[in-house]
Image (spheres, rainbow, N blue to C red):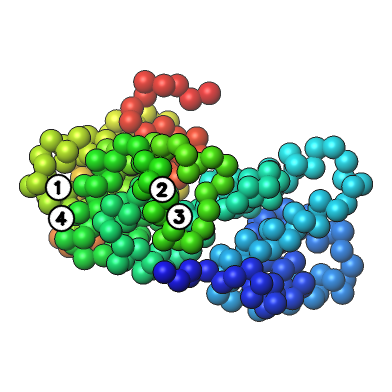
Amino acid sequence: MTDGNKSPEKAKAKLAYVDQAAILLMSLGEQDAAEILKHMGPKEVQRIGAAMTQLQNVQQADVQLVMSNFLEEVGTLTGLGVGADNYIRKMLVTALGEDKANGLIDRILLGGNTTGLDTLKWMDARSVADIIRNEHPQIQAIVIAYLDADQSAEIMSFFPEKVRLDIMMRVASLDTVQPSALQELNDILEKQFSGNGASQTKAMGGYKVAAEIMNNLDGSIEADLMDGIKELDEDMGNQIQDLMFVFDNLKEVEDRGIQALLREVSSDVLVVALKGAETELQEKIFKNMSKRAAELLRDDLETKPPMRLADVEAAQKEILITARRMADAGEIMLGGSGDQMV
């Protein structure tokens, strides 16, 4: 098997220091990058600004290299004093997100090695699909169960329907992975697991993971896959479905959460999504809008011509993605109002 990522040596040879600075600043976000640029001279800002405008198709391996180089440079600056590790952790989490940052932190700060599975998180979905396409279905299922649900869903879209069904049922049936299976995956990916991971079973997969992946699939793929699962194992299909958060489940979200969600959703997408929604959900949306906005939305729904089911499902999926993102950020709670926000 060949590794789809560029080697660090090749990436390092390709990236000039100014390009690395540009990638680092763009990874940090507008506000933090602006604060850093304030401390630079005009020529430095011009050079880095020009490099930013010329960046195209930045590979994940490049971002990883830049972050690694930055950590190495910081490690040589003893003047930063105690607490540098804590700062670096916060910076990486802000720039990369917690999951991806943790792997990099462990490797750089703790001296660990990146596992083959963690390397896959940095790759695009098509590349991962190509890497595991010809592997045993159980290996494919372990990879899909390990990666983030949105990435796994995208990877699944590159497989035929029959293969998707086989993988998803294996994911749902997973509980723990034996050392021998992890060792086989190590050999395939030509990487080593850090720490003592190769000597312990690892919790992975299950109905909840399968449901999260299903939630991120396109509507037509999700429906066909669920039908296939239920045909082979109705109980499994029902348990996965019970754990999925679908569009109609929004009626169980507390009013404050609905109000927050509506502020993030465009009216054009909302009217299409509600075209195929239950009356109960429509009424919940109306009551969490201003009277004027609710009246306009009702009028739009009544005058909107019949819509293609695929368009309605796409609009509902877009809103669900927003809802899950807000839930992950702690801005709203999905699944009812049993817990109070503070």
Which residue position holds label 3?
Answer: 186
Q: Earlier in the sequence, mark 4 or mark 3?
A: 3
Single out the mark in the foreground, 1 or 2: 2
Q: Earlier in the sequence, mark 1 or mark 3?
A: 3
Disc 3 and disc 2 in contact, CB within 8 angstroms: yes
Residue placed most toward the observer, 184 or 212: 184
Residue placed most toward the observer, 185 or 342: 185
Which residue position holds label 4?
Answer: 224
Single out the mark in the foreground, 4 or 3: 3
**Secondary structure state at the residue bearing disc 4:** helix
Image: 262 above or below 189: above
Please give the name of the residue rendered at 42% of the width and 50% of the height, measured from the top-left corner. Answer: 183
Q: Residues within 10 Å of mark 1 (few under 14, many from 20)?
A: many
Disc 4 and disc 1 in contact, CB within 8 angstroms: no
Left or right of 234 on screen, residue 87: right
Image: 91 above or below 255: below
Q: Is residue 231 visible?
A: yes
Q: Amino acid at mark 3?
A: Asn
Please give the name of the residue rendered at 86% of the width and 53% of the height, measured from the top-left corner. Answer: 76
Q: Earlier in the sequence, mark 4 or mark 1?
A: 4
Single out the mark in the foreground, 1 or 3: 3
Taking the view exactly as shown, the residue that stands out farthest to the right is 79
Q: Position of residue 199 (x, y in %)?
A: 47, 39
* Label of residue 229 in the image: 1
Which residue position holds label 2?
Answer: 182
Q: Earlier in the sequence, mark 4 or mark 2?
A: 2
Q: Amino acid at mark 2?
A: Leu
